[in-house]
Structure formats: C-alpha cells, structure tokens
Amino acid sequence: MKKKSLSVEAITIVILALMMIFVVPGLISRYQLNLLGRFLGLAIAALGIDLIWGYTGLLSLGNGIFFALGGYAISMYLKLQLPPGQLPEFMTLYGVDHLPWFWRPFYSFPFTLLAIVLIPAISAAIIGYLVFRNRIKGVYFSILTQAATIVFFNFFNGQQKLFNGTNGLTDFKTILGNDINSSQTQWIFYTLTILLLVASYLLCRFLTTGRFGDLLVAIRDDESRVRFSGYNPTGFKVVVFAVSAILAGIGGAMFTVQTGLVSPKSMDIAFSIEMVIWVAVGGRATLYGAILGALVVNFARSFLSAQFPDIWLFFQGAMFLIVVTVLPGGIVGLFKSFLPQKLTTFSNLEK
C-alpha cells in the first residue's frame, strides 16, 4: 500500500513539473513567470525549514544566512564576467586596485556550483556542532541562530570594498556567455528551479521516511528518550541542519539569478522569520505544505503590497496569527480535515 502511494506521488510530481515547465509559461506574462520562478526558489528554502523545524523540532531563525550565502556565491561569479584585468565596478568606486584573494576562485563556474552547496553546509555544520554538542535546544537554539544572523548581517553590511555593503551585488550581464536577462535564459532559470525543487522535495522525502526519519521525529518529540535508547542526537541534528542550509543556499542562488540582486537584507532576522511563517501557513511536517505556504504567502504579499502598500504587513501578521491560533495544521491541515474519513484513515495507515 505504501509502495502504491509512493508511485502515485511520483507520477503526480512528474505531471506537475511538466505542466509547470511547458504549459504555465504560455498562460502567464514574462513578469508573472519571473515572479513564479523567484517564489519557487523560496520554496526550496522553505523545504529546509520544514525539515529542521517540522520533522526535527529545531526552530531555526537563521536560515536567511545560508540563503544569502548561496546568493552571494553565484553573484560573485556573475560579477566576474568581465574582460581580463577589470574589477567589478563597485570595487573601483571604493579604490580597490586588485581582486581580493577569496574572489578569484569564483572565476570558475564549477567552483561556484560547489560553493553554493558547500559554503552554507560547512557554515551550518560548524554552527550546529558547536550548539548541539552542548545540548542546546528549544528557544535557546532559536536565539543563537538569531544572534548568528546579526553577526553575518553586520559583517556583509559593513564590507563596502568586498561586497558593496548594504547595496549588495547587482547589475549582472552575462552567464556562460549568454545574456542573463534574456527571455530564453530566464526560462532556463525557471525550468532549473523547478527541477531543483523536485530534487529537493525527493531528498527531504527520503530523509523523512524510514529509520532516519523515525529518528528525526523521535528527536523532535522526546530527545532524552532517544539518548536513553543509545543514539547520539548530535550527529543527526548537525546533518539535518547542514541539509537545511544547503537547500537554503540553492534557493538563494536561484532567487538571485531571477531577481538580479543579492544584499545583506536577506540575512536580517525578519526574512528568516518569514521563512518560518511560510511553513506554518502551509503546514508543518508535510513538505508539500512548505512549498504551498511559500507560494501562497509570497503571492499574497506581492498582491497586497501593490494594492495596500502602507498596511500590507498587517495582513501578513494577521495571516500568521490566524494560522497559529485557529489553523495549527496550516492549509494542508485544513484540507485534510475536509477529506472523507476513509481517505484520512488510509493516509494514517501509510504512515
């Protein structure tokens, strides 16, 4: 019965992905397609939040760090698409006369792809190990991730000569010899974002099923009992935190190439809290709820900020309060409550 369910899920994912790639672009404008591509990039980051918060019970308020690190990695490569000997324009403006040593590897596209994954993963693994080995969890873990966000934000915000400070990196021209702003290139980014989202979902699905997934849920529900059973939760939590950071980095990179900008603003506390709101609205510990929440909240924000520019933040706050107080299961939980009893029972048996 479980194998049959997985087969149906796989077929559904393939059909949805094909429709998103080949049908949707013909139904909406280029601007709307670009907007959808950005939000799908955010959905990749939301999956990481659901993995670490929904399944492992660790509320990270610092995943914006890893999102921005992925964005900066791809941006540094894009800013180096210049004639030999030239420097990015902002460095010239601030009087820099030679390229900093850590920028040089980003001339290589393969290195950049590795950096998008490895820099967030290594950063998260170091932070996670230092935190988890001391058995810090709950609200203290959330506070520490917030503190890390402040440190990274202030560092990047204050480095005008290295990262253009608060203005961030922007004005990208080409990628692999192609105009980055052309319709064809942006469609490729959109398609790649969908494929990466599918791959990220499948990875999270794999990690949350079987024995590893059971251990994550056990850590979330009763970590002391997991230790008593002979398992050391530290390694599992470090791995999950690192995977969550990788997904945030990939999402940040895809968001950046479709917006044409990365800045320290992605590292501020508010953005990391927004990620949590996406998952809460969609439905914790469901994975597809994280994707749904990211799309719903961001499309709502796009619409409301245009219609009500002065008060749209109140709508976002109200949405979160309603979910927390009335719909703790999010949109997915609300949908499940309307399912016929037989389907609900069948879903529970599969778990």
Image (cartoon, rainbow, N blue to C red):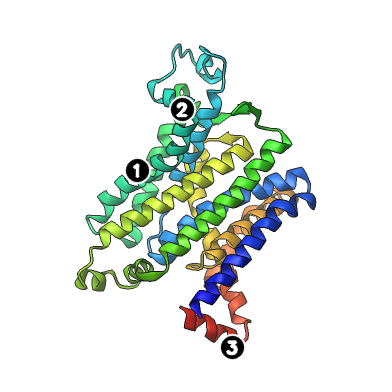
Report how far apart the C-alphas of labels 2 and 3 lie in the structure: 55 Å
Asked where in the image residue 59 lies, by quadrant, the reply is bottom left
Label 1, secondary structure: give it.
helix
Q: Residue at x 43, y 38 (%)?
A: 114
Q: Nearer the viewer, residue 255 or 323?
A: 255
Query: Upstream in the sequence, badge 3 or badge 1?
Result: 1
Q: Nearer the viewer, mark 2 or mark 3?
A: 2
Q: CA distance from mark 1 to mark 2?
A: 18 Å
The residue to which callout 1 is attached is 122
Amino acid type at mark 3:
Gln
Residue that mark 2 sits on: 106
Disc 2 marks a residue whose amino acid type is Phe
* SS assignment at label 2: helix
The quarter of the picture where residue 283 lies is bottom right
Local secondary structure at mark 3: helix
Residue sitting at x 26%, y 58%: 234
* Side (left or right) of 37 relative to 272: right
Residue lying at 34% horizontally and 55% vertically, measured from the top left? 239
**Can residue 315 be seen?**
no
Residue 4: % across, % down: 54, 76
Q: Earlier in the sequence, mark 2 or mark 3?
A: 2
**Figure label count:** 3
Q: Is residue 110 visible?
A: yes
Which quadrant of the figure has residue 30?
top right
Instruction: Please name the residue that numbered disc 3 is placed on.
Output: 341
Label of residue 132 in the image: none
